[in-house]
Image: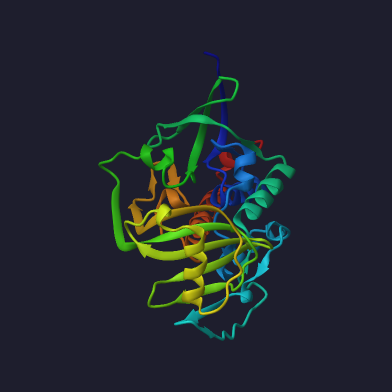
Amino acid sequence: MAESRENTPVVIVGAGVAGLTLANILQRNGVDCVVLEKRSRAYIDQRQRAGALDSFGVHVIRKWGLGEVLEGGDPIPQDEGGFFIDGQAMPMDIEHDEEGGMFIPQHVLVRNLTDAFLAEGGNLRYEALDVRLENVGGEQPTVRYQDTDGTTKVITCDFIAGADGFHGVSRATIPADVLSEYSYEYGYSWLTVWAAVATSPAGMAIHERGLSGMIPRGANATRIYLQCPVDDTPEQWPDERIWSELEARFGTPVTSGEILSKQVIPLRSVVFDPMSYGKLFLLGDAAHIVPPMSAKGIHLALHDTDMFAKALLARVQQDDTSLLKNS
C-alpha cells in the first residue's frame, strides 16, 4: 500500500468547534497545523449541536480576532429565552454588555470557522480514516491515517491536539494505567428532540412533572429537552405526548410541528485526568462531558482551547522558531 510522509508543527484531530477554533488561532499567529476529520464536510455542516454561547465563549472568540465567525446563519439574541416555574412565566431583567451571550446554531459556527480557516489557506482534511497516534509520549509524535484514495499518510509533528470527542481515538491513545476517570450518574435522562418548528416559547421550565427546555436553533428549528426516567425509550414518547407534556410543564400553548428525531440520553458528568500526556493534549469532550444543556460542553471546550493556544504561542514567543510557519 502506498505511503506518504510529511511534517507539521501541530496536528489537530477533529473539526468541531474546539479543533477549528484552535486551527484558526494558530494559523493567524504564524503556526502551521493540519486538521484531520473522519466525517465529510457535508455531514459536519448539518450536524446539530448546542446553539448558545455565553459571554465567556463570545469573549474567547473575539479576543483571538475571530469575531466574524459569529455572524450569519440567523443568530438569535439570548434575551429571547426565559424561565417558567410551575407553569408561570418568570420575567428576566438581563443586562448585556458588548460581549454578551448569544444563540448561534453550532453547525453555523462550525461552518463559519471552517470557511475562515480555508480562506487563509488552512489545511483541513475530511474523511481521514483509521487515525492512529504514535509516540505521543516521545519528543516527536506521529499521526497515521488513511486517505480516501487508500494512501497511508504519515505526519510527524511537535504536538497533537485531540479534539475528536468522547468516543474519539485521542484519549484512547493514553495508556490506561495513566488515565483516571471520574464520573457521576444523575439518575434520570433527557428525552432530546429535534423539531422543524419556530421556538415558542423559548426557555426552560421547572415543574413537578420534570424539567423541560425549548431552545432555538434557527428561525424554524428547535431543540427540545424533557426530563424522563432513566429507563424510558423513544417509543414511549409519541409526538402527541411530547407536545402535550411541554404545554403542561411550560403552562402555556406551545408551537408544535414536525419532529425530525428523538433520543433518550442518560445524564452523567465525566472528567478524565490528566488532560495531557506527553505531546498530546485533550480538548473538549475528549477530556470531559457534561449533561447537554445550556451549551456547557462548548464553553468548556473553548476554555481548553484558549488555555492550550496561549501555552503554545507562549512557547513560540520564547524564540522556539521550530513551530513557526516556513521556519
Give the residue furthest to the top.
Answer: 1
Q: How many marks?
A: 0
Residue ranking furthest to the left: 177
Q: Nearer the viewer, residue 258 or 29?
A: 258
Residue drawn at x 56%, y 69% as measured from the top left = 54
Residue 256 showing in the rendered view: yes
Residue 308: percent from left, percent from top: 50, 53
Q: Residue at x 55, y 73 (%)?
A: 203
Q: Considering only vertical position in the picture, is 189 above or below 113?
A: below
At 61% from the left and 69% from the top, the residue drawn is 255
Find the residue positioned furthest to the front: 240
Q: Residue at x 50, y 56 (%)?
A: 301
Q: Which percent across, then down, holds residue 316?
A: 57, 48
In this view, the residue in front, 107 or 179, is 107
Q: Nearer the viewer, residue 240 or 92?
A: 240
Which quadrant is home to the C terminus?
A: top right
> Is 48 on the left or on the right of 66, as rendered?
left
Let me know if residue 295 appears in the view: no
